[in-house]
Amino acid sequence: MKKIWGAIALILLVGGALFFYFRFCFVFGEGVKSGELNYVVYKGVFFKTYEGKLIQSGLRSKAAGSIQSYEFEFSVANERIARELMLQGGNIVELHYKEYFGVLPWRGFTKYIVDSIIYSRPVVQPEVLPSDVHHTTKSAEVEPTDAI
C-alpha cells in the first residue's frame, strides 16, 4: 500500500512540476515590436515590477463605432533595461520580447517580457514651413446692402 501512495505522490509531483514549467517558464513565442514608447513605470504592492506600454502605428476597432491605436503592454524583468527604457519615453523603439503562457507576480503583470532594446530614435516632428502657416487677419466689415 505504501508503494502505491508513493507512486501516486511521485506522479502528482512530476505532473505538477511539468505543469509549472510549461505554464510559467516555457517560452511560447518571441518576437520584436516597434512603436512609440509611451511609458515605463515601477509599480506593485507586494512585488515591484517594471511595466510599460508601446503605441504602435495603425488603428483598430474593438467595438463598432470606436477607433483605438494598437497598444503593446509589456513587463521588463531586467532592471538595467527598464531604467534605460525609462529614459526613452516618447522615442520610437524596437523591443525584443518573450511570451509565456502564464504570469508570475515577481516577473511582471503581463505575459510579454521585454529582454532587449534593438533600436531607439527620437520621433521626427514634421517641419512647418512659413508658407504652411495661415495667418488670420480681420477682414473689413461689410455692411449688408438692401436687396430689392
Image (spheres, rainbow, N blue to C red):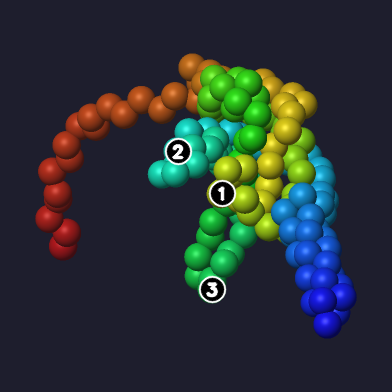
User: Which one is earlier in the sequence, the residue at label 2 or at label 1?
Assistant: 2
* Element type at mark 2: strand
Local packing at callout 1 (Cα closer than 10 Å; few below 14, some 14-19, many 20+) is few
Residue, disc 1 = 105
Element on which disc 1 rests: loop
Q: Nearer the viewer, mark 2 or mark 1?
A: 1
Quadrant showing the N terminus: bottom right
Amino acid type, mark 3 = Ala
Q: Position of residue 16 (x, y in %)?
A: 76, 65
Image coordinates of residue 88 in percent, x first then y, are 57, 23
**Eyeballing the image, is 85 above or below 68?**
above
- Give how far across and how far down residue 54 sits, in percent: 60, 40
Q: CA distance from mark 2 to mark 1?
A: 12 Å
Q: Nearer the viewer, residue 78 or 82?
A: 78
User: In the rendering, which numbered label is found on residue 64?
Assistant: 3
* Residue type, mark 1 in image: Pro
Classify 10 Å Cα crowding around label 2: few (below 14), some (14-19), many (20 and above). Answer: few
